[in-house]
Amino acid sequence: MKEYNNTTYAILGILTTGCKSGYAIKQLMDQSLTHFWKISYGQIYPTLKQLTANELVTVTNTQQDGKPDRKEYDLTPKGLNALKNWLSQPIEQIPVERNEVLLKLFFGKHQSTEQNRMQLEDYKRKLEERLQTYHAIAHSIQTHHENDPNAQYWLFTLDYGKRTTVAAIDWCEATIKAI
Amino acid sequence: MKEYNNTTYAILGILTTGCKSGYAIKQLMDQSLTHFWKISYGQIYPTLKQLTANELVTVTNTQQDGKPDRKEYDLTPKGLNALKNWLSQPIEQIPVERNEVLLKLFFGKHQSTEQNRMQLEDYKRKLEERLQTYHAIAHSIQTHHENDPNAQYWLFTLDYGKRTTVAAIDWCEATIKAI
DNA sequence: CAACTCATGTAATACGTTACATGATTAG
DNA sequence: CTAATCATGTAACGTATTACATGAGTTG
């Protein structure tokens, strides 16, 4: 079986949720997966073309009233199979998450205490904003996707974001005091 | 002032810690920055060349007894300036941390509860391993860099890793139960 | 008619890893 | 003599973003 990268499987997965065009895929990404997977049109359209060539999806040109034409992509049995196979595989390893704030703090010796503290305060503010976003997305899923069988899983991923963000905020507070 | 990417500043920063060759930079990276910034020789050597051309560092060929020759890089005042300027800038935005496990769980509807649980158990194991590594690095810093003025900052970055990893482990446990 | 949303697509560029190539020295 | 460590470097490839180009339809 041919190997694809995770972004390709992300697109394949989104096609099972009712989003069928490149544009709709981007929409869902920006709403729900934005906290742990983000891609641009520059990835989406070429990938859809490749998936079509490899027969994991089929494409249909559809007309809409009041909106421009769009291309509708549907998973083939082969495509669904590839998705399920990927889902069942454990990840190879946890990737290193690059963190610019940690990188700067690592060299904190070259700055004043005040400057290091400012950097942490700024980071904390940004983390708090992100936490608010997570709460907002969770709320939106609970109201707009009440009966969607996906909702449960989507909320799990959000819970991950909330928990790790809270931990990061706590760290900011502790480090600001300790510095 | 010319703009560089964070990897370039990471290299510039490491050059202030006593590591002066491409090889030594990689060594320190693999020991201490490995949990939040990782780069390959394919980035290091070309970047050192570029930094030399732009006069942020100078290079000297040095002979060592019992070891192959190596190139010694030293920050110029211009280089130290560029580093300090970068350190003082707040980050633009927190990047999205791609997470393959969350991506798979997001599409968990297409798998059995048992398969989802296995994926989480596996992830939890890997996180626990990582946590052990953090403890080991912290211990190593406390014993080998006792008097290094950098040690304090290095331990702060490790504390971040510990806290967020513990939060992720807790999430695994909670989600395994809830699923 | 201007601004916005819907919709698709590509080219240039940036970033990064992997694999490969080379070679000195040292320890067993 | 062989394996390991020290040391430098490049070419091919994969991945991803940004900017650009285009154009239909809708709302104010």
Image: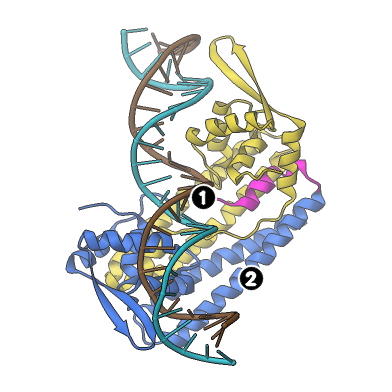
Chain colours: A blue, B yellow, C brown, D cyan
Position of C20 with respect to A29 (left or right) is: left
- Name the spot of residue B18 as percent of width and height, x first: 67, 28
Tag shown at residue B78 = none
Tell me where residue B69 appears, x and y as whole percent: 56, 14
Q: Which residue is mark 2?
A: A129
Label 1 in the same subunit as label 2: no
Circle 2: element type:
helix
Residue B70 horizontal/vertical position (percent):
57, 18
Q: Which contiguous range is marked in magenta?
A: A98-112
Q: Which residue is mark 1?
A: B131
Image quadrant in which you'd find residue B93: bottom right
Magenta highlight on residue A105: yes
Magenta span: predominant SS is helix
Q: Are marks 1 and 2 in contact (CB under 8 Å)?
A: no
Q: Quadrant of the C terminus of chain B?
A: bottom left
Query: SS class of the residue under badge 1?
Result: helix
